[in-house]
């Protein structure tokens, strides 16, 4: 019946090393019992040592010995104890009981004392004595587990602990060592700590109204009303919309503002935070500081409830009167089911038309430019007045310069000469006085660039000087000072020739005045009957060698004196000025020649 006739394997490997082993199965798989040894035989063989050259081998140590640090490893005796601590500086307690746990480690006879942490005790708790061998007396002895028992006092480092009980392991260990244990005692608790754990007694009679039922029934159910607050009677007041929320769970009220974009207000969402609002106050003295103290049930007879709100009704909340003009669909259903109200017609709110307040512009105080100062009356952040850009670009760097004299009752001021510059780009005027040596007057800038208004113009409709107003011989008034235009440069004359249509009135007036002067000159000449007009004409032509028809003033006066022609200096200056003006407006700039003078 045998099918397998191979021999069993006797060579094995362990941890990479080869070793031989006795076969346990014979040929054919039959078990061999001759090669198996009992446990006693194996132990005997392990203790037998061959006899060495230097004598028999040493005996092995007995197997029953175990060191103390191995036998008592992690074996700890625990004792429950307490100690009493005096509290001298307290009116509520005179002493304090502190509970501790005393641990005795059997492996090295060390001890430690740990106090359990009590919440809000205000004391440094935890490990009071670290783990070490605690000295018993001054003779160098230390505490042993034989010195510990229930119902005894133990002093460590000047503090006496009362041991009241131990854990079951400690009790079994001490009894196994033949130590008789005392009966356990009750743990003493701290009276002040127990007093604090007692709930505070409340002397409030519970209400018959079930607030919990109201909260569970109406939780998350809110009535919403749309209202307005009319504050137009006060200064800067307006009609502002609000949303009133009434929470059915606790009868609280909340008033929220309706924020709109670009309404000019800070986005404060809540006007009145969620709270119970009083409806009727109890009788109280006028000196009661209700604005400081919190309102309690003793000061209020009645609070606002859901029945106090209705569409079309005016309600006063904390001194502000709100008019309710509409509500949402949930509020309508609640009032229909709860109170049987069916009239929820929304009220149309008509906005009051704002009265237009006329803008009153204060009078001009003389500081700065009129248009620039006027911008302060239009905006809180004034902007510069708008300028004519096209005019500035076309007339950039174009300046009309005139020579002006100051009209003054002082003889010293009459001799002063000024240069008046008119800027065509912005219609501004500046006046400069050329310095004259030994005149006693400091020259320089007399008037900065500014627009000068004509006399008689108002701040509402100011009129400023224009180029057509600046003609030779005309008088202009600049901030109370009168100036007479006596001369102009060639650029002014060229400008007037090219823009003759802008000076029609000035040309007409100059011609009329010149005609009047001619009549006066003729009257002066008629007074002298001995004058020969032909000789006078020939004399003037002889002096005009280049034929330009121009003589300077000195030669002209000398020639008139030699011919006996009367020369009135005032009248001559008027004729010269008007003649120059007439020539510059018609043909070109030049003084009148004697021929033209005699003809006029």
Image (cartoon, rainbow, N blue to C red):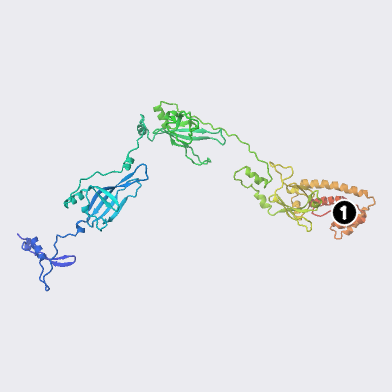
Q: Nearer the viewer, residue 129 or 425?
A: 129
Disc 1 on helix, strand or loop? helix
Q: Taking the image as drawn, is residue 501 in sight? A: no
Q: Residue 88, how many percent across, how many down?
A: 36, 46
In the displayed image of the protein, which residue is found farthest to the front? 139
Vertical comparison of 32 with 256: above or below = below
Q: Taking the image as drawn, is residue 16 in sight? A: yes
Report the number of discs: 1
In the displayed image of the protein, which residue is found farthest to the bottom? 53
Quarter of the N terminus within the rendering? bottom left
Q: Residue at x 33, y 42 (%)?
A: 192
Q: Residue 350, how many percent across, how many down?
A: 53, 31
Res. 205 image quadrant: top left
Q: Residue 186, how many percent across, how many down?
A: 24, 43
Q: Nearer the viewer, residue 312 or 187?
A: 187
In the displayed image of the protein, which residue is found farthest to the left? 1
- Please give left or right for residue 237 compared with residue 469 in the image: left
- Please give left or right for residue 124 compared with residue 26 in the image: right
Number of other residues with Cα within 10 Å of mark 1, as a class: few under 14, some 14 to 19, many 20 or more: some
Vertical comparison of 555 with 259: above or below = below
Q: Residue 249, how many percent across, how many down?
A: 39, 33
- Please give left or right for residue 170 compared with residue 474 in the image: left
In the displayed image of the protein, which residue is found farthest to the right? 530
Q: Nearer the viewer, residue 105 or 571?
A: 105
Q: From the image, tell me which residue sits under label 1.
A: 595
């Amino acid at each position: 019946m045998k099918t397998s006739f191979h021999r069993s394997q006797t060579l094995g490997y362990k941890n990479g090393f080869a070793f031989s082993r006795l076969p346990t199965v014979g040929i054919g798989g039959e078990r061999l019992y001759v090669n198996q040894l009992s446990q006693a035989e194996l132990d005997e063989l392990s203790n037998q040592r061959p006899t060495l050259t230097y004598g028999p081998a040493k005996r092995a140590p007995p197997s029953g010995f175990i060191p103390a640090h191995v036998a008592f490893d992690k074996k700890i005796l625990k004792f429950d104890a307490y100690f009493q601590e005096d509290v001298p500086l307290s009116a509520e307690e005179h002493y304090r009981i502190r509970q501790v746990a005393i641990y005795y480690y059997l492996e090295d006879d060390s001890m430690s004392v740990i106090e359990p942490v009590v919440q809000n005790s205000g004391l440094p708790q935890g490990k009071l004595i670290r783990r070490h061998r605690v000295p018993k007396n001054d003779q160098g002895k230390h505490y042993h587990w034989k010195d510990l028992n229930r119902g005894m006092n133990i002093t460590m480092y000047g503090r006496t602990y009362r041991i009241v009980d131990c854990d079951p392991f400690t009790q079994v260990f001490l009894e196994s060592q033949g130590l008789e244990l005392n009966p356990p005692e009750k743990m003493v608790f701290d009276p002040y700590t127990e007093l604090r754990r007692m709930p505070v007694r409340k002397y409030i009679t519970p209400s018959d109204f079930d607030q919990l039922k109201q909260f569970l029934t109406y939780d998350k159910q809110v009535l919403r009303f749309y209202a307005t607050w009319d504050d137009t009677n006060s200064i800067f007041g307006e009609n502002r919309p609000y949303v009133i929320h009434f929470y059915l769970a606790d009868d609280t009220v909340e008033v929220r503002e309706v924020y709109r974009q670009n309404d000019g207000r800070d986005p404060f969402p809540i006007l009145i935070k969620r709270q119970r609002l009083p409806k009727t106050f109890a009788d109280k003295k006028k000196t009661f500081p209700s604005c400081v103290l919190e309102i309690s049930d003793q000061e209020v007879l009645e609070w606002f409830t859901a029945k106090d709100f209705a569409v079309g009704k005016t309600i006063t909340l904390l001194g502000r009167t709100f008019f309710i003009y509409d509500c949402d669909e949930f509020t309508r259903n609640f009032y229909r089911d709860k109170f049987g109200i069916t009239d929820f017609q929304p009220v149309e709110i008509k906005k009051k038309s704002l009265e237009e307040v006329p803008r009153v512009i204060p009078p001009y105080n003389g500081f700065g430019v009129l248009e620039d100062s006027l911008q302060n009356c239009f905006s809180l952040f004034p902007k510069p007045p708008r300028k004519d850009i096209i005019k500035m670009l076309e007339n950039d760097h174009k300046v009309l310069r005139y020579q002006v004299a100051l009209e003054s009752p002082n003889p010293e001021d009459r001799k002063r000469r000024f240069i008046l510059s008119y800027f065509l780009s912005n219609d501004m005027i500046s006046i400069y006085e050329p310095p004259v040596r030994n005149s006693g007057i400091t020259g320089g800038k007399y008037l900065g660039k500014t627009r000068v208004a004509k006399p008689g113009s108002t701040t509402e409709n100011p009129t400023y000087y224009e180029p057509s107003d600046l003609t030779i011989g005309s008088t202009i008034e600049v901030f109370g000072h009168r100036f007479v235009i006596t001369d102009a440069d060639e650029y002014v004359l060229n400008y007037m020739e090219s823009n003759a249509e802008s000076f029609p009135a000035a040309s007409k007036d100059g011609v009329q005045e010149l005609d009047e002067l001619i009549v006066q000159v003729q009257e002066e000449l008629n007074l002298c009957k001995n004058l020969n007009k032909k000789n006078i004409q020939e004399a003037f032509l002889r002096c005009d060698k280049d034929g330009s028809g121009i003589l300077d003033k000195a030669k002209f006066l000398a020639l008139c004196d030699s011919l006996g022609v009367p020369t009135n200096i005032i009248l001559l200056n008027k004729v010269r000025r008007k003649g120059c003006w007439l020539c510059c407006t018609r043909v070109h700039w030049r003084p009148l020649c004697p021929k033209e003078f005699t003809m006029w």
